[in-house]
Amino acid sequence: QGVLSIVRLSTLLDQLRSYGFVALGVILVLVLILVVPTENGSLPIRGKFPFNTTVNPMHNVAFVMQAGGVATAMAAIMGMDGMTNAFGRYLTVQMMILDSNYRHCETKWPWGRIYSVVQKCKDSEAEIQNFIPFSEEEIIDKSDSFVRRFKICIKHHQRLIGIVDRINAVFGSSFFFQLCASSSIICFAGFQAAL
C-alpha cells in the first residue's frame, strides 16, 4: 500500500508539473506571436530575410516561419524537460523504495519494527512497512537474511547509480546547450525590449 501511494503522489505531481509547463509554453508562444506589435511590416522577432518582409504576402510568409520556429523550439524544450521529469519521477520512486528496503533489511532486529511504528503514527498510508523486492528472483529465493537483503539493496543502489550516469551521459551536453540557448534568448529578448 505504501508503494502505491508513493507512485500515485509522484504521478499526480508530475502531471501537475507537465500540464502547468505545457500551459506556460503555449501562453509564451501565443504572447510572442500575437501580442508583440508588428506595425509598419515589422516581425515579432528581428531577422533578415532574402526578400522584402514589409509587403503583405512575404510578410505573412516570414511571420509563419517565425511562428513555426518559436513553436518548434518550445515543443523541443517541453519534450526534453518532460523526459527528464519522467526519468526523475521514475528514479525518485525507486530511491524511496530502496530507502525503505535499507531500513527493513533486518528480519529479526527490533529497530526496524520500532522505526516503522514511529513512521506509522505520522502517515500510515504513505509509509512502506516491509522489504519490497525489485524482481521475481528476489521473491522466489527463500533464504531470507540480513546479508541477502543488504546485498539486494546494494545491487539495486548500484543499478540506480548506473541509470543516473547513463542519463547524464545522454542528456548532459544537450541540456547544457539548451541552458545556453535559453539564456541567450532571454538576454536577446530583454535587449530587444529595451530598444
Image: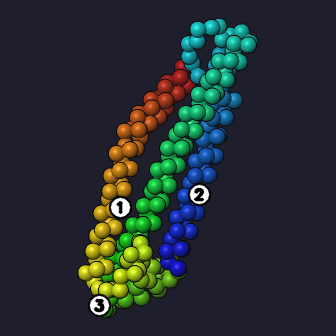
Query: Looking at numbered disc 3 in the image, what kind of residue is underneath it?
Result: Trp
The residue to which callout 3 is attached is: 109
The residue to which callout 1 is attached is: 160
Which SS class for mark 3?
A: loop
Is 107 located above or below residue 126 in the figure?
A: below
Percent x, y of residue 84: 46, 50
Q: Residue at the spot x=65%, y=34% of the render? A: 31
Q: Which of 33 and 39 is in front in this view?
A: 33
Which SS class for mark 1?
A: helix
Q: Nearer the viewer, residue 169 or 128?
A: 169
Is 85 located above or below residue 152 in the figure?
A: above
Spatial CA distance of label 2 from label 3 is 40 Å
Query: Looking at numbered disc 1 in the image, what kind of residue is underneath it?
Result: Leu
Q: Residue at the spot x=69%, y=29% of the render? A: 34
Q: Earlier in the sequence, mark 2 or mark 3?
A: 2
Spatial CA distance of label 1 from label 2 is 23 Å
The residue to which callout 2 is attached is: 15
Is 70 located above or below residue 86 in the figure?
A: above
1 or 2: mark nearer the eye? 1
Q: Can residue 183 be seen in this view?
A: no
Query: Looking at numbered disc 2 in the image, what kind of residue is underneath it?
Result: Gln
Furthest residue toward right: 56
Q: Residue at the spot x=66%, y=21% of the render? A: 63
1 or 3: mark nearer the eye? 1
Question: Left or right: 131 with respect to 36?
Answer: left
Q: Residue at the spot x=62%, y=8% of the render? A: 51
Query: Which picture quadrant has residue 76?
Result: top right
Percent x, y of residue 61: 68, 18
